[in-house]
Image: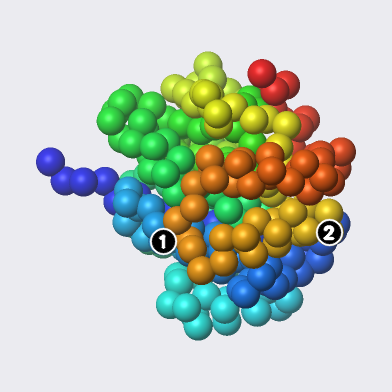
Amino acid sequence: MTEPRIIAVVPVRMGSTRLPGKTLMPIGSKPLLGHLLDRLGQCQRLSSVVVATSEKPENDAIETYCHERATACFRGAEDDVLARLLGALEAHDADVGVVTFGDAPLVDPQIVDDIVGRFVENGTLDFVGNDLATTYPPGMEVEVFSIAALRDSAQRTDDPAIREHGTLFIRQNPEIYNILNIEASGSHHRPELEIEVDTPEDAVVITAIADHFEGRTDFTLGEIIAFLDSNPELRASNQEVPRRWKQFRDEPR
């Protein structure tokens, strides 16, 4: 049986409203995007990785950075993220798509592999993710889905407010798609932690983590949690930042 072609796509752009240019902002010794790409490079279940940015000239720098490190870069619509994701995945002949987010540069490679594994081994699912409800620390989001389901969702909705959130139509329609949400267990169940980058406060936290693990790309979520727990003031410094994604998720549990 032929193994499915599993492509991770990273949607990023320079036009963040709360932290402009964050995609390439220095976090320790490398750009934020570099941390995420290095983390994805540790994954065992991915066929390849493609960065999906928009056609706006301000994103030329992202394409240049990708070329410098021999990472594929696809350019598409600025606001129609669903079309951009689908275009990137179809351009790379994907059977299965994996989304990790540009504001989550320290996503744990093992979590990526585990969720990909759940999708592939089940064989009947359209979508598996850990972001339908917040149980993992924000910044550990992974979504895995069939290209057929993503293509179907693109045909079913033309609402710009939905398409700008990529897989949102799939996530909101469990009566159409076979969906599974993976919940964190044990020590990984820390929904109150914030390991994402939306604001300058977040950048301080992520930089401290990156500096602590300088020289490593394989540190785990467990190690990140231990570091934050040993630095309670740092841990608390970004926990009150408003998060826009909360309107699309169930409450932490």
Where 119 falls versus 175 (above or below)?
A: below
The kind of residue on which mark 1 rests is: Gly
User: What element does badge 2 sit on?
Assistant: helix
Which residue is identified by label 1? 41
**The furthest residue to the left:** 1
Q: Is residue 28 visible?
A: yes
Q: Are marks 2 and 1 in contact (CB under 8 Å)?
A: no
Q: Is residue 218 left or right of residue 231?
A: left
Q: Is residue 119 left or right of residue 143?
A: left
- Horizontal and vertical percent position of residue 183: 53, 24
Q: Is residue 147 visible?
A: no
Residue located at (50% from left, 83% from top): 68
Instruction: Compare residues 119 and 234 and report the one nearer the observer.
Output: 234
Where 76 falls versus 185 (above or below)?
A: below
Where 125 falls versus 15 (above or below)?
A: above
Residue located at (72% from left, 21% from top): 251
Instruction: Compare residues 174 and 19 and report the one nearer the observer.
Output: 19
Q: Is residue 110 left or right of residue 95?
A: right
